[in-house]
Amino acid sequence: MSEPWARRTAAALRARLAPDRPEPSEEATAAVRDLRVVPLALAAGAAAWAGTGGRPLVGLLAAGALGLTATVAAAIAAAGLSHRRAGADRTAPGAWWLVTVLVALVVGTIGVAQAERLRSGPPARLAAAGAVVTARLEVRSDARLVAGSATRPPVLLAGARLLAVSGRGGHWRVRVPVTLLVTGGEVGWWARQPVGTTVTVEGRLQSPRRGDDVAALLRVRAPPTAVAPPGPAGRLVEQVRAGLRQAVAGRPPEPRALVPALVLGDTAGLTPELQEVFRTTGLTHLTAVSGANLTLLLAFLLLGARWAGVRGWWLRGVGLLGVAVFVALCRTEPSVLRAAAMGLVALAALGAGGRRAGLRNLGVAVLVLLLVDPFLSRSWGFALSVLASGGIIWWARPWADVLARWLPRLVAESVTLPLAAHLATLPVVVLLSGQVSVVGLLANALAGPFVGPATVLGFAAAGASLLSVPLAAGLGWGAAWSAQAIITVARLGARLPGAAVGWPAGPAAVALLAAGCLLAALLVPWLLARRVPTLLLALALLVALVRVPTAPGWPPPGWQFVACDVGQGDGLVLRAGPGRAVVVDAGPDPVAMRRCLDTLGVRTVPLLVLTHFHADHADGLAGVLAGRTVQQVWVSPLAEPVGEVVAVRAAAAAAGAAVTVAGPGTRVRVGELALRVVGPLPPRGTDDDASAAQNDASVVLLADVGGLTVLLPGDLEPPGQRALLAAGVDLRVTVLKVPHHGSGRQEPDFFAATGARLAVASAGRDNDYGHPAPRTVALARGLGMTVVSTDRAGGVAVTGTDADPGLVTQRRP
């Protein structure tokens, strides 16, 4: 009874169905199941996290305490290991305890030392004083543009190594990492600079957050001066990367953007809408530099080398050369080095190297990485890589062996590999995204056969670009074709109503989900060994995908207007027929907006209205576009903030939706829904606040939804409200969407002119603004309105007509 139950099941099936197939050697099994290094890796990770926290004494004490705590787990692992090579000496538990404590102290001390090096040098002291400095630095990562909002402009972020800094009367030669923040007209210049460029620039140093792996933030203030271009190796890498982009330049926009993301982790060309589609279907990992990329590359190289007759140490040399090329092309950043280590472990775990790797190898890789860079312990990407590799090592191969008894081996591995990685990483993914991708397993299984060709052909195109442009273009065509297949799978999966299910990201909910994943992992071997239960579960999964899970009674039948629960923002839906709706604003969160529309069964959006370009109304646009047909977009006549305007127009163009400025007098009818634009009008009064001026530029809509009248004024401020009153616009409706989320700044006569019976405020739970303001709630109630807000009620639905309106909420207010 000492054998694990899953292994006994697999052995029995092998004996009955394929008695001539040899069992894995005891040595190979022991390598996979050796748990002794796992406590060391866990203790090292916890100690590194404590040590890099920026408090030296606390970090060292915590490292020691964590090491002592881990000794119990180490003792269990050392004493309870059931799979051992015959004749091997058992490590004394006391010695293993001592090793665990020592590892935790060493890694924690290194973490403290590196954190102190960043926090105590001249750059850190200048940053604490907010000093303006002249810096000489070397660009170390590709630039990334972060969209702006109502209160901040777009910001370009890039990693750099600070080489020298002058300020406050001193000059220092240093060598520490910093993060560049660039705004304004210099964004374009910085975006074009290749990695390795040396630059002199003036800027203000700021302190980073505690636990960040940089010495300071450098906010650029003046035009930079390029001092030196990248070295020969850097120029060669840039040439190869540019060659890959050129090889797919003639392909359609989406595969043209996806191929560099698959091969190099270069996501600059991916639209927010496509990123949301990948996020919903659990395919986001394909667009990041990961161990999977290296595993595919090495598998192709080693297979080609074996076919060419390469053996022995020469074969290992080919593998090492592949690792070096991968790291060079994808940049020598911590995430790439992490991916290289995880890829080598995953490749060995799949048996590509003869003897299979196990958790022992994974634990050693984690220890080495944490010794080199303790700040990896604070990286979610590192945690996901380790968990995915661990899931593949521990579960994937035994599950595939069981499933391969009644399915082809290729199909079995296509199912079990993503299933193992999915279960292992699901709690962390939910912690980050707040949703469970139900379609993730199916999407990964269907997209899997195309990932290898796209990645390998992409790498081949990048290399061939140095030799022959036509050859590179031909290989790029193949990579783009495979990438298009992946995009098609993602889009079809995202269209399924039950593609993603919301899950709370709190500690208790995530812990419950983790326990459920472990229980599911225990049941998987039993399930996969039996054809009928497996097929029934697959059928149940398909049923769940085509039907959205909803709370009882939500949405109510016959709903006419819904204010979605999207947090601190507006996401409003007007019914236009079966599966059709006009959406007014998209909220700040694509996930929440998508979930609301999926629950309402909206598949087609004939018209999307963005009342203005603030992030709390436009950032969720990808959630509207993902898996839906959007035909037209109306926007505010005031094209500010510029960053949001650019992002909205780019996303709409990628989705094939025409963008039109909506002015007063514009009318449209969609099914039983009639819309009339009555604003914005020139505001009566002045307001020097740019954000308030943008609010007053909100598109104001009067809607008639099957006999129910609704006023949607966006974030209209009192000057804009007074302008509508002065223009004599008939504002009488049954439902009023309270302007600006229930802000305390309202015009009482505007509320009175609507004569509304119901006032709906769209605000986020526990928001920092205090919306809806008590004075606004009192104003509406004083006029006889029933007031309901999404921060307490969740989604709000209005049914019926003006003669007999009904109100239904997702939760009890």
Image: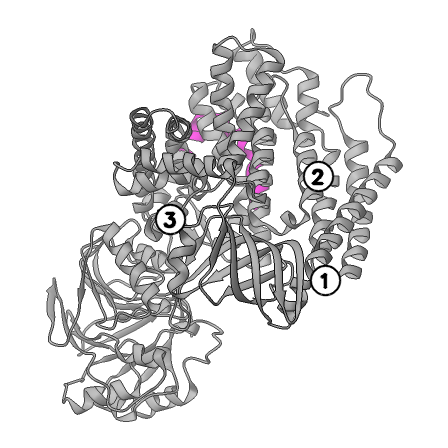
Give the residue pinned by disc 2.
367
Rendering coords of residue 122 (x, y %):
68, 63
Which residue type carries mark 2? Leu
Q: Is residue 539 visible?
A: no
Give the residue pinned by disc 1.
120
Q: Is the C-beta separation of discs 3 and 1 under 8 Å?
A: no
Near-viewer residue (341 or 582): 341
Question: In this image, 468 relative to 283: left or right?
Answer: left
Q: Which mark is residue 275?
A: 3
Looking at the rendered image, the disc whose residue lies closer to the viewer, 3 or 1, is 1
Please say which color scheme the image uses. one colour
Examine the rendered structure and indicate whether residue 150 appears above or below residue 358: below
| Label 3: few (<14), some (14–19) or many (≥20) C-alpha neighbours in 10 Å | some
Label 3 to label 2: alpha-carbon separation: 33 Å
Magenta span has 525? yes
| Main SS class of the magenta portion in the image | helix
| Label 1: few (<14), some (14–19) or many (≥20) C-alpha neighbours in 10 Å | few
Q: Which mark is residue 377?
A: none
Question: In this image, 38 relative to 325: left or right?
Answer: right
Q: Is residue 613 visible?
A: yes
Q: Which residue is rendered at x = 31% and y = 78% of the image?
A: 695
The quarter of the picture where residue 356 lies is: top right
Rendering coords of residue 275 (x, y %):
37, 48
Quadrant containing the N terminus in the rendered view: top right
Q: Tag 1's secondary structure?
A: helix
Q: Which residue is rendered at x = 40% and y = 61% of the image?
A: 186
The quarter of the picture where residue 592 lies is: bottom left
Q: Which residues are magenta?
A: 516-537
